[in-house]
Image: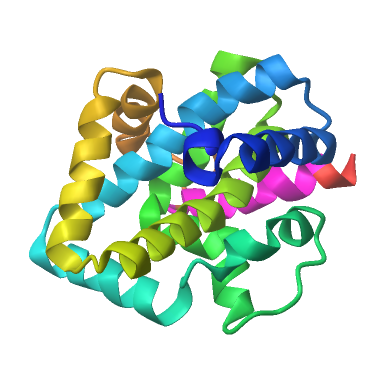
Amino acid sequence: MFSLEEILGSSAGSAAIQQIGQNLGADSSTLNSAIGIALPAILGGLANNASTETGAQNLDQALARDHDGSLLETLSGYLQGGVPAPRDADRQTDGSGILGHILGGSAGPVASEISARTGLNAGQAANLLITLAPIVMAYLGKQKQQKGLDAGSLSDLLTGQAAKNQGGIGGSILDMASGALDRDHDGSALDDLASMAADYFMK
């Protein structure tokens, strides 16, 4: 199963999970289960987007422009809400915007399914997705730089990772959510995701 430890390394991954748990008020067991679903869903969305030539090129351009991997060097600050601003910091850390590109209208339903399957409330699940999306993009940006990946090899990387998760809960949630309706039936499930996240912090 793809994990934060695999993305960040054992020590940094464990520290990130601890900080995210504190942010969300979630115990480690529940949080690890939720991350084990959320990460494959995000990666599955990216793999789906990059399965076409245009989608792969758009991802490659986004990584080159906005996600150079430097976020991983200031991860503690990002998770605590006070990350020093690197180049294009807003785009690097705009989790809702990133999810809009990756999952589109499926973002809200994915959060709802994570909540239903793990015991996190909907707001916690939404905030988890919003937190993880910039980390995934930073990871891919770092892979692109270190390995000299182009659009085609990025697509291959994501396809391979999606294949590892095939049949897993994260992948099945993405499949289910793709055909789901948003709560207010206005065609904008991403708005629902932001609403879920805001509702959690207002309680």
Q: Which residues are magenta?
A: 187-200
The image shows a total of numbered marks equal to 0
In the image, residue 107 lies at what x, y percent? 47, 45
Of residues 198 and 89, which is closer to you in this image? 89
In the image, residue 140 lies at what x, y percent? 39, 58
Q: Is residue 68 magenta?
A: no
Main SS of the magenta part reads helix
* Residue 115 appears in the rendering: no
**Residue appearing at x 11%, y 58% in the figure:** 52
In the image, residue 45 lies at what x, y percent? 32, 45
* Residue 29 appears in the rendering: yes
Of residues 111 and 195, which is closer to you in this image? 111
Work out which quarter of the rendered image holds the N terminus and state it: top left
Does 138 sit above or below residue 114? below
**Residue appearing at x 29%, y 67% in the figure:** 59
Q: Quadrant of residue 168?
A: top left
Of residues 160 and 142, which is closer to you in this image? 142
**Residue appearing at x 60%, y 50% in the figure:** 130
